[in-house]
């Protein structure tokens, strides 16, 4: 197959760049479930941002911590609207500028400023450690926030003797329509998606918050059958802290994130030889001798159960447990019939009279 992700279903929790990420995944054959976990609320008219900007003009910062590209652009655009963009750029041009990542660096340079240092990990903790080692006693630090406040970072710098001006350019808010996110929670808990992508740590926290009393079921799925794919280590931190193995590219870019998924998901597939055919199980499809065969959830569930022990007979009762609640043994027979029709290889699933079904391995 030429489409590396054909047969896989991937959840996208991003909001601002969801269409771009979805297009990159769909171009490689994936089925995408869009479920923004959060939305960004700009604060261009917020009094706190205006007051923080005035504080920087009144007492020019010695250090600027630029955390995000969208945040820096939003701050300068708001300053433009207030008629203080040039004075703000002037005071920031004299500061020691730390860009937490490439997007922040791009926004800094687009504004005509120059960044002197960036952390390899793109983490605030590394920035704080760098500044403490450099010495910040008696200095003013303008910390452009990325969403929520970062009290631990602020406290550490203040304890080192600095005065911190927090710049609240935007904040995170729940999605306008929470239904897609709750639907994604259902899909993850039911292992009906193969991967979930995260482009911010708050989005990962928001998914788990939305799970409510199903949080442990979601975490169990992410620890086993559902790949948690994060754009970078900072985004991954809430999941890593909860024991979830994550996949992340070395560079925090959407394209790199997609390439990581392309590398990882096919390696997690099960491939077996049955009834003279080479059979590979993907998320919502089977690949039979190189040909993709999309399957509905019930036939796919039956196939996964049978593929766990090829050649072993599973009773209707055992297969019934793999189907949605409320199904009966007739539903098992229907699922097996649809599985045979979908695979277009009728000899693969064998009926063993009065016992059940198995994958034919002889």
Image: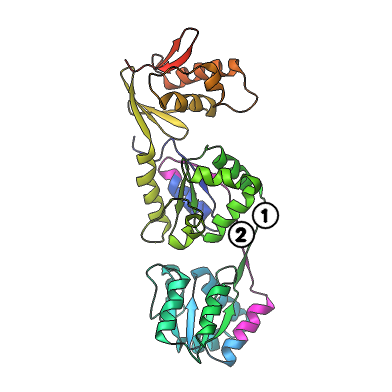
Location of the C terminus (image quadrant) = top left
**Most foreground residue, 355 or 5:** 355
- Residue 153 placement, left or right of 271: right
The disc at residue 176 is 1
Marked residue nearer the N-terminal end (2 or 1): 2
Location of the N terminus (image quadrant) = top left
Q: Residue at x 53, y 17 (%)?
A: 316
Examine the image and state in which quarter residue 113 appears.
bottom left
- Residue topped by disc 2: 39
- Above or below residue 104? Residue 289 is above
Q: Residue furthest top?
A: 353
Q: Residue at x 65, y 83 (%)?
A: 51
- Residue 306 placement, left or right of 2: right
Helix, strand or loop under label 1: loop
**Most foreground residue, 357 or 187:** 357
Q: Where does residue 35 sit, x and y in percent of width and height?
A: 58, 48
The disc at residue 88 is none
Mark 2 residue crowding within 10 angstroms, few (<14) / some (14–19) / many (20+): some
- Residue 173 placement, left or right of 138: right
Q: Are marks 2 and 1 in contact (CB under 8 Å)?
A: yes
Q: Where does residue 94 sit, x and y in percent of width and height?
A: 45, 89
Any part of residue 113 in sight: no
- Residue 241 placement, left or right of 172: left
Helix, strand or loop under label 2: strand
Mark 1 residue crowding within 10 angstroms, few (<14) / some (14–19) / many (20+): few
Q: Where does residue 197 sit, x and y in percent of width and height?
A: 48, 51
In reply to whether residue 279 is colored magenta, the answer given is no
Any part of residue 311 in sight: yes
Q: CA distance from mark 2 to mark 1?
A: 8 Å
The stretch in magenta equals: 26-54
């Amino acid at each position: 197959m030429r489409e590396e992700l054909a047969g896989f279903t991937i959840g996208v929790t991003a909001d601002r760049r969801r269409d771009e990420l979805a297009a990159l995944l769909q171009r490689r054959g994936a089925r995408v479930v869009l479920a923004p976990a959060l939305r960004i609320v700009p604060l261009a008219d917020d009094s706190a941002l205006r007051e923080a900007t005035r504080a920087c003009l009144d007492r020019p910062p010695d250090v600027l911590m630029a955390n995000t590209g969208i945040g820096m652009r939003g701050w300068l655009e708001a300053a433009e609207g207030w008629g203080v963009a040039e004075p703000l750029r002037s005071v920031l041009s004299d500061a020691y500028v730390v860009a937490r990542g490439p997007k922040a660096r791009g926004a800094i340079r687009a504004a005509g400023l120059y960044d002197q240092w960036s952390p390899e990990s793109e983490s605030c903790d590394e920035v704080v450690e760098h500044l403490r080692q450099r010495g910040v006693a008696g200095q003013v630090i303008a910390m452009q926030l990325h969403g929520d406040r970062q009290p631990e970072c602020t406290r550490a710098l203040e304890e080192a003797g600095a005065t911190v001006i927090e710049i609240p350019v935007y904040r995170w808010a729940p999605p306008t329509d929470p239904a897609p996110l709750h639907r994604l929670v259902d899909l993850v808990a039911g292992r009906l998606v193969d991967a979930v992508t995260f482009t911010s740590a708050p989005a990962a926290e928001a998914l788990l918050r939305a799970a409510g009393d199903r949080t442990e079921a979601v975490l169990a799925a992410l620890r086993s059958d559902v790949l948690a794919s994060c754009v970078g280590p900072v985004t991954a931190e809430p999941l890593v802290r909860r024991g979830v193995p994550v996949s992340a590219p070395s560079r925090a870019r959407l394209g790199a994130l997609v390439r990581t998924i392309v590398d990882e998901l096919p390696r997690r597939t099960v491939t077996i030889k049955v009834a003279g055919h080479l059979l590979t199980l993907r998320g919502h499809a089977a690949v039979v001798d190189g040909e993709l065969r999309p399957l509905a959830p019930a036939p796919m569930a039956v196939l996964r159960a049978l593929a766990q022990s090829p050649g072993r007979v599973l009773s209707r009762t055992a297969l019934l447990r793999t189907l949605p609640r409320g199904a009966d043994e007739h539903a098992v027979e229907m699922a097996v019939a649809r599985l045979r029709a979908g695979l277009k290889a009728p000899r693969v699933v064998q009926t063993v009279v009065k016992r059940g079904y198995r994958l034919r391995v002889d």
